Image (cartoon, grey):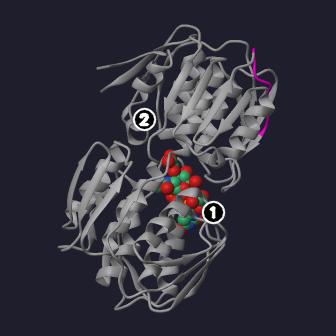
Amino acid sequence: MQSIVIEGGKRLSGDVKISGAKNSALPILCASLLAPGEHVVSNVPELQDVITMGRLLENLGAGVQSSDGVFHIDTENLAKDEAPYELVKTMRASVLVLGPLVARLGSARVSLPGGCAIGARPINLHLAGLRDMGAEVEIEHGYVVAKAKRLKGARIYLDTPTVTGTENLMMAATLAEGRTVLENAACEPEVTDLAACLSSMGAKITGAGTDTVRIEGVSELRPMKYSVMPDRIETGTYLAAGAITGGDVRITGCEPAHSAALLTKLRECGFEIEKGPGWIRLKGCDRPRAVDIKTLPYPGFPTDMQAQFMALMCVADGLSVITETVFENRFMHIAELKRMGADIKVQGNAAVVQGAENIFGAPVMATDLRASASLVIAALAAKGSSEISRVYHLDRGYERMEEKLRGIGARIKRVG
Ligand code: EPU
């Protein structure tokens, strides 16, 4: 199994170019199921999750070709309505085919994703919303089986502003009969990007990016030609990497407005932040001040940046309280950070981090995507060498991470 070896203590400086957003690309690829024909999606990051999504679409009968971040998807003839366990178990986002399949084919069989390292992650709200739209939804032998001759517009209140739930229901509603209103919808930029993509296909959507999304169903959509927005979590991860080394990094090809909560916190730590259209520059300080964060749905501090920010707080001056409110078990990185000398105590859904002057290289193990990123960040600042195993977690969500980090001076290599 491959691992990544990092020699810590090198100040990072230079430019890092951001890739297309994983969590935007995945729903957009699924949206191709809504309209028969040839779709072209560009700025798609080359990631394991994207490859899995391509396989899933092929398994449904779509023709999928990709090169240099451009996907050509032919959805003229779909052969099946099933997302099998083998694919869904490796990637929860597979559940995003549910809405489009029911809307286009009138039926879908999608394996229930099951739990994952960061929490139970139920999909009850996706299912309740489809039922509100008139679908018959049953759980049979571990599969969600959904049927509807034609979905009907409905007023749907989401108990929690679920991101993929909002996306699934928004896609389903585009072809429903009449108007759907999603209340307490997720406001994440990925939802807005998907809405823009669907609108380019002829969907009638207003309010995406707010907590009330209105969708006027249409009888058919046309194929898309769409470019995925930049990845705000990748942006934040490289900012944290630059920050922890006291470096001077410029992130290019990003959307600064999507990182507002993180930039506020980085400034509070004492980092100098400059930004302009498509770029953010972070200049390091001697030692960051410890600050508190609480993860929240967008525009709050993203749960997908909690682990990386915690790594930064491990070397900050003072005590930081990090509260995770989105997922119930997203502290798996703490045990590994502690092996590098970090001083962290967990109290319920809060982690109390006492910043240390130094942390030290160690062999550590990745448990999920963002936890792995936090270990990379910690290793960049640690004294000595760290070996991070189970790199496949990183490959699910970061395109060419070692190359990008090497480009700004990190001593990093892949072994095995
Ligand atoms: N929830 C329910 N019922 C549902 C759906 C969600 O109770 O039917 C709960 C979840 O258990 C969780 C909360 O609602 O406590 C929020 O979960 P959400 O559904 O918003 O998460 P998701 O859609 O499964 C997406 C991203 C995650 C990201 C979260 C939160 C994709 C493919 N995944 O997941 O990304 O952490 O939103 O922002 O978009 C990652 O990239 O590393 C990642 C995990």
Q: Amino acid at mark 1?
A: Cys
Range drawn in magenta: 286-292
Q: Residue at x 44, y 73 (%)?
A: 171
Residue 297: image location, x then y, percent:
66, 56
Question: How many C-alpha atoms fall within 10 Å of the one at disc 2: few (<14), some, or many (≥20)?
Answer: many
Sequence-wise, the earlier of marks 1 and 2 is: 1
x then y, percent, for residue 407? 45, 20
> Could you tell whether 118 is left or right of 287 in the image?
left
Q: Quadrant of residue 400?
A: top left
Front-most of residues 71 and 122: 71
Magenta stretch encompasses residue 282: no
Q: Residue 81 got which mark?
A: none
Q: Quadrant of ligand 1?
A: bottom right
Q: Position of residue 373 (x, y in %)?
A: 51, 32
The correct choice, above or below, for 251 with respect to 297 in the image is: above
Q: Residues under labels 1 and 2: Cα distance?
A: 26 Å
Q: Residue at x 47, y 81 (%)?
A: 173
Q: Is residue 90 visible?
A: yes
Pick the front one: 5 or 200: 200
**Quarter holding residue 88:** bottom left
What amino acid is at disc 2? Leu
Residue in the picture at 59% in, 28% down: 250
Where is 287 relative to 187, above or below? Answer: above
Disc marking residue 394: 2
Q: Which residue is mark 1?
A: 187
Residue 288 on the magenta span: yes
Decide: few, some or many residues near mark 1? Use Cα within 10 Å; few <14, some 14-19, many ≥20: many
Q: Quadrant of the N terminus?
A: top left
Residue 393 screen position, x and y as percent: 41, 37
Q: Secondary structure at mark 2?
A: helix
- Image quadrant occupied by the C terminus: top left
In the rendered image, the residue lying farthest to the top is: 384
